[in-house]
């Protein structure tokens, strides 16, 4: 399945129905009055979050969305039928922007969450509405008003608890395939992973967390190099980073240099990303050279305040310890009270 995380669509609410021009015509009632009914209202356009979706792929095949228009009014004071609302389903983590102004309209994260996007047009009034004591046979009706419409840009930011970051070929795909049911493509060349992959990891018996494998970053990624900023936004929502460092010696940079390059790219993309908790994961311990290099560089990472893990996703070494440590950290983060942001314009802000 193709992964699509940014699309443009055009949505239009239904137009209101036209009011009816009609007069009663009944036997033995020579002075029948106006009886034209009102037009129906146009259907609204809603966005609804569907937890069964994980990509915006469907929007590649359909760009225009239009709700049902309202029915026209009829004689005998019968109102036109209101147009049915249109529900557009999106995956959790979808951001909705006005394409023309760039305004963020909504950040949809909760399954079942709904957003009224566009209001349908009002139905026009029939001539029965205009009857007065001085104008008993009005011939004036109103057309329905048009429904709202706009171009939208939808962006998807994956919802995951843990994000894997690191150089290409650092072992991210191998790790996520070892601790979850995710089966990303794995090969011994850079940029094997071209799309994000999500995996559900079980820990502590019955608890779970979601891990996101993000395509490898390189120096200059925040400026568009390599896969660029396309996938950096997918790790913005994560609570914890696993920073995978290839200790096998097969990378051009030494482990510490790999680590600093990736963190610079995260900071350039969004400085707040460096405020998140990071675990340093030294990979490929099944290679003798990696074990030696990991022991040499571990003190430097620990002096910087990082927890360090040495693993081999091939043999399983260190995986259980890593998963339990991730689970414990997530438990602490979820139990912590939410941070409050001071707003000097709000007198109730502590």
Image (cartoon, rainbow, N blue to C red):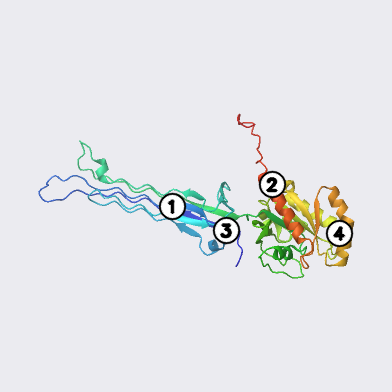
Q: Which residue is mark 2?
A: 333
In the structure shown, which secondary structural element does the residue marked by tag 1 occupy?
loop
Q: Give the camera-side residue of 235 and 138.
A: 235
Q: In which quadrant of the rendered view does residue 68 lie?
A: bottom left
In the structure shown, which secondary structural element does the residue marked by tag 3 occupy?
strand
Q: Disc number at residue 7?
A: 3
In the structure shown, which secondary structural element does the residue marked by tag 2 occupy?
helix
Task: For the C terminus, give its image quadrant.
Answer: top right
Q: Where residue 138 appears, x then y in whole percent?
A: 23, 43
Q: Which residue is mark 4?
A: 294
Q: Earlier in the sequence, mark 1 or mark 3?
A: 3
Q: Earlier in the sequence, mark 2 or mark 1?
A: 1
Comparing labels 3 and 2, the label whose residue is closer to the camera = 2
Residue at 49% across / 49% down in the picture?
117
Q: CA distance from mark 4 to mark 3?
A: 43 Å
Task: For the N terminus, give its image quadrant.
Answer: bottom right
Q: CA distance from mark 1 to mark 3?
A: 19 Å
Which residue appears farthest toward the bottom when viewing the image? Answer: 187
Comparing labels 2 and 4, the label whose residue is closer to the camera = 2
Is residue 57 visible in the rendered image? The answer is yes
Q: CA distance from mark 4 to mark 1?
A: 59 Å
């Amino acid at each position: 399945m193709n992964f699509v995380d940014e699309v443009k669509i055009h949505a239009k609410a239904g137009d209101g129905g036209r009011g009816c021009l009609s007069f009663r015509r009944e036997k033995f009632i020579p002075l029948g009055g106006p009886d034209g009914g009102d037009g129906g209202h146009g259907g609204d356009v809603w966005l609804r979050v569907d937890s069964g979706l994980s990509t915006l792929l469907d929007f590649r095949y359909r760009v225009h969305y239009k709700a049902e228009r309202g029915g026209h009014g009829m004689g005998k004071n019968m109102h036109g039928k209101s147009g049915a609302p249109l529900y557009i389903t999106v995956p959790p983590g979808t951001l909705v922007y006005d394409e023309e102004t760039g305004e963020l309209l909504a950040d949809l994260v909760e399954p079942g969450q709904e957003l009224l996007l566009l209001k349908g047009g009002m139905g026009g009034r029939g001539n029965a509405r205009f009857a007065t004591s001085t104008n008993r046979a009005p011939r004036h009706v109103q057309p329905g008003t048009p429904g709202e419409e706009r171009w939208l840009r939808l962006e998807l930011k994956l919802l995951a608890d843990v994000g894997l970051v690191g150089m290409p070929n650092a072992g991210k795909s191998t790790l996520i395939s070892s601790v979850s049911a995710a089966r990303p493509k794995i090969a011994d060349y850079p940029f094997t992973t071209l799309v994000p992959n999500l995996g559900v990891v079980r820990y502590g018996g019955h608890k779970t967390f979601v891990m996101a494998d993000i395509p490898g970053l390189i120096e200059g990624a925040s400026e568009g190099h390599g896969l660029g900023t396309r996938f950096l936004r997918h790790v913005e929502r994560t609570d914890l980073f696993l920073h995978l460092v290839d200790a096998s010696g097969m990378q051009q940079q030494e482990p510490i240099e790999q680590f600093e390059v990736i963190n610079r790219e995260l900071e350039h993309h969004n400085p707040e990303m460096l405020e998140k908790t990071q675990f340093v994961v030294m990979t490929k311990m099944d290679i003798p050279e990696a074990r030696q290099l990991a022991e040499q560089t571990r003190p430097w990472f620990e002096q910087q305040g990082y927890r360090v893990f040495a693993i081999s996703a091939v043999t399983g070494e260190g995986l259980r310890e890593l998963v339990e440590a991730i689970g414990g950290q997530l438990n602490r983060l979820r139990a912590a009270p939410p941070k409050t942001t001071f707003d000097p314009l709000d007198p109730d802000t502590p």
